[in-house]
Amino acid sequence: MQKLKERWGLTSNFQLTIIFIVFSITGSSSVFVAKPFLNLIGLELANFPKTWWGEPLYWILRILLIFPFYQILLVIYGWLFGQFKFFWAFEKKMLKRLGLGFLFN
């Protein structure tokens, strides 16, 4: 844990615990929040063809659409738990690695 605290620039185990809690809450709630949106735009498994590629296509699209919800909720929960600075820096770093760094220039 000490290496992780040093890598992330954290000062206490409490701060590390809060960050782990934020990551866990964000993962599950992004799926929960995205479900009504996915239903609204008609992305339901029943709407895909009953072929060998229908279900994998559904899951790929679902994951791609849940990703933006995760990014937004990560920063919001980070702010609510008093760790906005950490999660904002984490978000910028992750999006730059994905080739979306132009969003922060």
Image: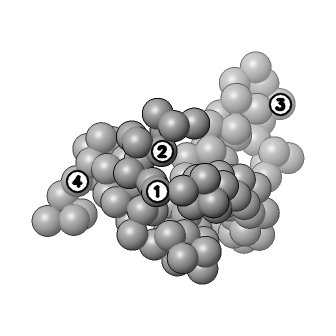
Task: Quickly name the residue at label 1.
Answer: 11
- Which of marks 4 and 2 precedes in the sequence? 2
Name which residue type carries label 3: Lys
Q: Nearer the viewer, mark 2 or mark 4?
A: 2
User: In the image, residue 76 lies at what x, y percent?
Assistant: 55, 75
Label 1 vs label 3: CA separation? 52 Å
Say which of 44 and 2 sits in front. 2
Q: Are marks 1 and 4 in contact (CB under 8 Å)?
A: no
Say which of 28 and 58 sits in front. 28
Q: Is residue 34 above or below residue 96?
A: below
Task: Quickly name the residue at label 4.
Answer: 101
Please tell me which residue is depicted at 45% across the width and 62% down the height of the picture: 87
Is residue 23 visible to us here?
Answer: no
Count of numbered circles in the view: 4
Q: Quadrant of the N terminus?
A: top right
- The answer to which image quadrant residue 37 occupies is bottom right
- The answer to which image quadrant residue 61 occupies is top right
Please tell me which residue is depicted at 76% across the width and 20% down the height of the picture: 52
Crowding at label 1, few (<14), some or many (≥20) Cα neighbours within 10 Å? few
Crowding at label 2, few (<14), some or many (≥20) Cα neighbours within 10 Å? some
Is residue 14 visible to us here?
Answer: yes
Say which of 3 and 92 sits in front. 3
Label 1 vs label 2: CA separation? 7 Å
Q: Which mark is residue 5?
A: 2
* Dot 3: element: loop
Q: Are marks 1 and 2 in contact (CB under 8 Å)?
A: yes
* Dot 1: element: loop
Q: Quadrant of the C terminus?
A: bottom left
Task: Quickly name the residue at label 3.
Answer: 50
